[in-house]
Image (cartoon, helix red, strand yellow):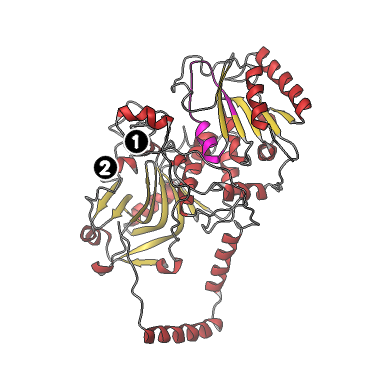
C-alpha cells in the first residue's frame, strides 16, 4: 500500500505555473467549452446530493471486530469495547490527477494501489488495476500482513454453499497481489482510467442478485456503507463531499439477471443514482478481450463469497452468518445512508417532513408463504387499532403486493415503526427515517432465526426486535442461534399481541410532534 506526498515546488515554479494557467485560461475561453461543460455537469451531480442541513443524529450500534480467543467471545458480545464514533476522513483523489490515462513509468513514481477499507466482502481501493479479466493489487511489498487474504476480497464468483468452499477460492485468474517490478512487466507503460467512484458487484447473476433484499440490503447497502466511511460529516439531509457512483459494474451478470420480480431493484437503483452508468458481463468481456490495462480510480469490490469469511459470519465472532455482518458495524456518520434515501425521496416527489404522530405500519403477509395464524393476525390488527386510538398513533395495515412501488416507498418513508413476518417487505425499512423512536419488529417462527433484517436496522440506527411467540427479544444476546427449522417458511407463525404492544408502547413513549 502506498501513501505518497507531493513535493512543494519552489517559489519561482509557482509563479511560472500561475502565469501559464492564466494564459491557458485565456486561450481556452476562445476555444471549445467542452471541459467547462464537463466540470459544470460534475458539479451539478455533486450538488444533487447537497440539501439543507440540520444537526439531529441517531447513534449507531457497533461491535468490535478484532481477533479474540473463543473464551473471550461471549464476554465481547455482551460488553463490546468502545469504538471510535467518527471515522477519519479521506479526501477523494483529484480527478485531474487521473485524467484519461495513468502513466505507469518510471518505476520510482508508479501509482500503487491503496486499500482504503479491508472489510471482508466489501474492500475499497484507490487505483485497482484490471487486465485480461484479472484484478491487480499493486503494492510495494505483497507480503505486507496488512493486505487481506484474497479470499476475503474476491472469489470465483459462484454462489457460496457449504459444498463449494474450494471451488470459490480465487486463483491468479481472479486477482493477484504484485509488486511494482511485476506490475511494469504485466501492465505495461500506461493504464486507461475508469474514473470516479465505481461499485463492482462480483456476484453471479440470478439467485441472490435478482432478489430485492439480497441485492439492495446486502450488495448496494453494504457498498454504500463502505464508501461513506470516507466522510464522517454527512448531514441529516444527506449533504456529503462524496460524489455518487459513476458506474455499477455487474461483471458476471447480463442485463436481466439483477432484476427482481416486483421490479424494485432497477427502479430504486436508477432513482438513487440517476446519473450512474450500468455495465454488464459483455462490457467486462470487452475490456478483457481488449488486452489493455485499466485502473479503477476508486472502487468498492463487493463479493458475497468473500463476505462469508467475515469475523461475524464464519470467523471468531460467528453469530450472524451474513455476508454483511462485518461491514454493517464499520464506524461512519450516523447519517451515512441519507444521501441515498434523500435521492430516492426526491425522485418520487416525497417531501421529507416528519409525521405529526407516530406511524406504525404492519406489513401483512396473510395468504402467502410465511404468515401468521389467522387468529394471531386478527388479534394483532385489533390490538394495534385500539392502541392507535388510545395513544394517537397512525396505524397502517399494508399489503405491499397490492400497492404500487411508489406507494410502497412513500409509506415506508413515513413509517416510524415497521412490524412484519420475516420477509421481503421488511427490506423497505431502508426508506424509514432514523429517529429516536424508529424500530422494526420482525416475527419469526419459534426455534428459527436469521439476521437478515436485524443488521440493516441496527446500521441505520433503528431498534430491532425479534418476535417469536410470546417473546420479544431486544438484544443480540437474547436472539436465538441462527437456524431454519422445517416450518421457518410456514403459514402458521405465532405472535403475542400483548407482548408486542407492551414493547411498542414503551418505544414510542415521549413522542412529541
In which quadrant of the rendered image does the N terminus lie? bottom left
Q: What element carries label 1?
A: loop
Residue drawn 70% across the image and 16% down it: 378
Report the residue marked by disc 2.
171
Q: Nearer the viewer, mark 2 or mark 1?
A: 1
The CA span between labels 2 and 1 is: 16 Å
- The mark that comes first in sequence, 2 or 1, is 2
In magenta segment, residue 366: no
- Please give the label number shown on residue 373: none
Residue drawn 27% across the image and 49% down it: 176
Report the residue marked by disc 1.
309
**Magenta segment range?**
441-461
In which quadrant of the rendered image does the C terminus lie? top right
Residue 193, image x, y percentages? 40, 62
Answer left or right for 251 relative to 407.
left
Q: In which quarter of the image is residue 191?
A: bottom left
Residue 168, image x, y percentages? 32, 35
Where 301 falls versus 440 (above or below)?
below
| Residue 337, visible in the rendered structure | yes
Viewer-nearest residue: 356 or 350? 356
Amino acid at each position: 500500500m502506498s501513501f505518497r506526498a507531493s513535493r512543494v515546488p519552489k517559489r519561482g515554479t509557482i509563479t511560472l505555473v500561475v502565469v501559464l494557467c492564466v494564459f491557458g485560461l485565456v486561450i481556452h475561453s476562445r476555444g471549445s467549452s467542452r471541459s467547462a461543460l464537463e466540470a459544470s455537469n460534475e458539479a451539478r451531480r455533486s450538488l444533487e446530493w447537497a440539501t439543507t442541513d440540520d444537526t439531529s443524529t441517531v447513534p449507531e450500534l457497533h461491535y468490535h471486530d478484532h481477533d479474540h480467543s473463543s473464551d473471550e467471545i461471549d464476554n465481547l458480545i455482551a460488553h463490546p469495547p468502545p469504538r471510535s464514533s467518527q471515522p477519519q476522513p479521506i479526501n477523494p483523489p483529484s480527478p485531474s490527477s487521473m485524467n484519461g490515462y495513468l502513466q505507469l513509468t518510471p518505476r520510482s513514481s508508479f501509482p500503487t494501489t491503496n486499500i482504503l477499507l479491508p472489510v471482508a466482502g466489501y474492500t475499497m481501493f484507490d487505483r485497482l488495476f484490471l487486465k485480461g479479466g484479472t484484478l491487480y493489487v499493486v503494492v510495494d511489498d505483497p507480503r505486507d500482513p496488512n493486505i487481506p487474504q484474497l479470499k476475503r476480497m474476491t472469489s470465483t464468483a459462484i454462489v457460496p454453499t457449504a459444498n463449494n468452499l474450494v471451488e470459490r477460492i480465487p486463483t491468479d485468474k481472479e486477482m493477484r497481489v504484485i509488486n511494482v517490478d511485476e506490475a511494469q512487466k504485466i501492465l505495461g507503460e500506461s493504464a486507461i482510467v475508469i474514473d470516479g467512484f465505481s461499485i463492482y458487484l462480483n456476484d453471479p447473476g440470478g439467485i441472490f442478485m435478482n432478489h430485492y433484499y439480497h441485492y439492495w440490503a446486502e450488495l448496494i447497502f453494504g457498498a454504500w456503507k463502505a464508501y461513506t466511511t470516507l466522510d464522517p460529516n454527512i448531514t441529516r439531509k444527506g449533504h456529503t463531499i462524496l460524489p455518487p457512483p459513476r458506474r455499477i459494474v455487474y461483471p458476471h451478470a447480463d442485463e436481466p439477471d439483477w432484476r427482481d420480480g416486483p421490479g424494485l431493484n432497477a427502479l430504486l437503483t436508477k432513482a438513487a443514482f440517476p446519473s450512474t452508468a450500468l455495465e454488464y458481463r459483455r462490457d467486462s468481456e470487452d475490456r478483457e478481450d481488449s488486452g489493455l490495462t485499466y485502473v479503477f480510480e476508486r472502487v468498492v469490490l463487493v463479493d458475497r463469497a468473500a463476505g462469508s469469511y467475515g469475523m461475524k459470519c464464519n470467523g471468531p465472532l460467528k453469530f450472524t452468518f451474513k455476508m454483511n455482518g462485518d461491514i454493517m458495524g464499520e464506524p461512519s456518520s450516523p447519517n451515512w445512508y441519507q444521501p441515498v434515501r434523500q435521492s430516492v425521496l426526491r425522485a418520487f416527489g416525497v417531501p421529507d417532513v416528519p409525521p405529526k404522530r407516530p406511524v406504525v405500519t404492519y406489513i401483512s403477509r396473510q395468504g402467502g408463504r410465511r404468515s401468521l395464524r389467522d387468529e394471531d393476525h386478527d388479534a394483532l390488527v385489533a390490538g394495534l387499532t385500539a392502541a392507535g386510538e388510545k395513544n394517537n398513533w397512525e396505524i397502517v395495515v399494508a399489503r405491499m403486493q397490492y400497492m404500487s412501488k411508489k406507494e410502497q416507498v412513500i409509506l415506508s418513508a413515513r413509517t416510524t415503526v415497521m412490524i412484519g413476518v420475516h420477509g421481503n417487505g421488511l427490506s423497505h425499512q431502508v426508506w424509514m427515517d432514523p429517529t429516536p423512536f424508529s424500530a422494526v419488529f420482525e416475527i419469526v417462527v419459534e426455534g428459527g432465526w436469521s439476521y437478515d433484517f436485524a443488521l440493516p436496522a441496527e446500521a441505520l440506527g433503528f431498534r430491532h426486535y425479534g418476535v417469536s411467540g410470546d417473546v420479544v427479544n431486544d438484544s443480540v444476546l437474547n436472539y436465538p442461534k441462527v437456524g431454519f427449522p422445517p416450518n421457518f417458511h410456514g403459514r402458521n407463525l405465532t405472535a403475542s399481541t400483548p407482548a408486542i404492544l407492551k414493547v411498542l408502547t414503551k418505544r414510542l413513549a415521549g413522542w412529541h410532534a
